[in-house]
Image: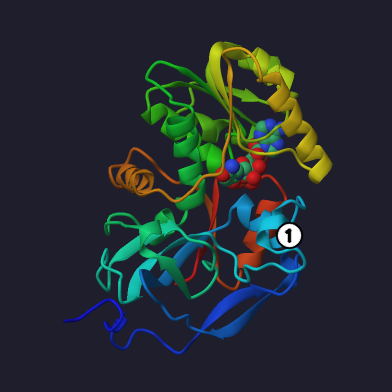
Amino acid sequence: METAENQASEVKSGSVPATMRAWVQGRYGTSEVFDLVDLPVPEVEGKQVLIEVHASSVNAADWHISTGYPSFVRLQMGLRTPKRKTPGGDAAGVVVAKGPEATRFALGDRVVGNIPGGGFAEYAVSNEANLVAFPETVGFAEAGALPIAGLTAIQALRTHGGVQPGQRVLVNGASGGVGTFAVQIAKILGAEVTAVCSTGNVQQARDLGADHVVDYKTQSFGDVGSGFDVILDLASSQPIKVMKSILAPSGTYLYIGGPKGNMPTWAARFARAKLAFRKGDQKLSVFTAEADDQDMSDLVSWVADGSLTPAIQRTYSLEGAMEAFDHLAAGHAKGKLVVTVR
Ligand SMILES: NC(=O)c1ccc[n+]([C@@H]2O[C@H](COP(=O)([O-])OP(=O)(O)OC[C@H]3O[C@@H](n4cnc5c(N)ncnc54)[C@H](OP(=O)(O)O)[C@@H]3O)[C@@H](O)[C@H]2O)c1
């Protein structure tokens, strides 16, 4: 009888070379610590699949993990040098090899998901549980824009915010990767949406469906109004007490994007938030988005049926991935920055 142990890995005939191009870093730092090198194509085991990567995208998480900043990131990612060598937590591509226990996908399936890293390479390995299949009507670039930013937006609003039809939602930081998904997903969930962004992104927020848009460059933050059932704060641009004051009596403050700065700044704002929400019916939610089958499938379905459109500002080649990385680090990405590997 054949068992998991004696089944061989399955490989798509003729499609997997011995080596691949991949971005790697040997120390913490910004784009200058990365090199595009030739590496052996990783092998799969157990429930893993090998993805021929077609698209990935840049996320704030890539920047934090690669720079080790704020410094608490290093507790998990490696004290002196980063354990993760190749960035790219998003991947969309084609399954070209399967471990002996991988059963979810067939060779040749188009898959997308939040992977532990390695998306900025020609091939990446992921546990099959992190991936969902997507149809040919969804392009690789659109799919590659989805995982981390889309999962963050859907889990913030639906899982942690519990957004219901008719509720009022504020998205502070509506023009970046997460914000552009959040505005659309809040509308899909039936909310009335107020978006905060800079002047050049006001029209984009309207086009994405925001009912009200406040330009933080030319308007007072107070113009957003008050009584929000859910606030998704991606910018940390206002004091906690201001955000609390515009929340409905039993509303939820989704604290997602930390302030600019290192540990003391992060710790101080976090402590102020915990203190401010320790009593009363208003809720504070701090979480890290994670791979989830249902959420990822819903994102793909919404893109396939046209109700969700990844706002892709620009695509970069694999060779140009560090330009995308620097663009995101400058803090004013407009929607998603996608790396098209093929
Ligand atoms: N907890 C999690 O699991 C999780 C997951 C993903 C991201 N995040 C965090 O969420 C935050 C947003 O991520 P992202 O991927 O959307 O980043 P992003 O693509 O870099 O977008 C950031 C956006 O912030 C906006 N912004 C800057 N200053 C602002 C201000 N004063 N008021 C309002 N908006 C302002 C910018 O828009 P303008 O150009 O219009 O100013 C920019 O588009 C980051 O802090 C990230 O670390 C957390």
Does residue 213 appear left or right of residue 64 in this picture?
left
Where is residue 287, by image quadrant? top right
Task: Please state the quadrant of the image where ligand 1 appears.
Answer: top right
Residue 61 x/y as whole percent: 62, 53
Does residue 236 appear left or right of residue 250 in this picture?
right
Look at the image and tell me whether residue 24 can be seen.
yes
Q: Residue at x 61, y 74 (%)?
A: 23
Seen in the picture, residue 176 relative to 197 is either above or below; the reply is below
Residue 270 x/y as whole percent: 72, 33
How many neighbours does mark 1 have within 10 angstroms: few (below 14), some (14-19), or many (20 or more)? many
Residue reaching furthest to the right: 264
Q: Residue at x 29, y 84 (%)?
A: 8
The total of numbered circles placed on residues is 1
Q: Residue at x 37, y 19 (%)?
A: 165
Seen in the picture, residue 71 relative to 31 is either above or below; the reply is above
Name the kind of residue labelled 1 in the image.
Answer: Thr
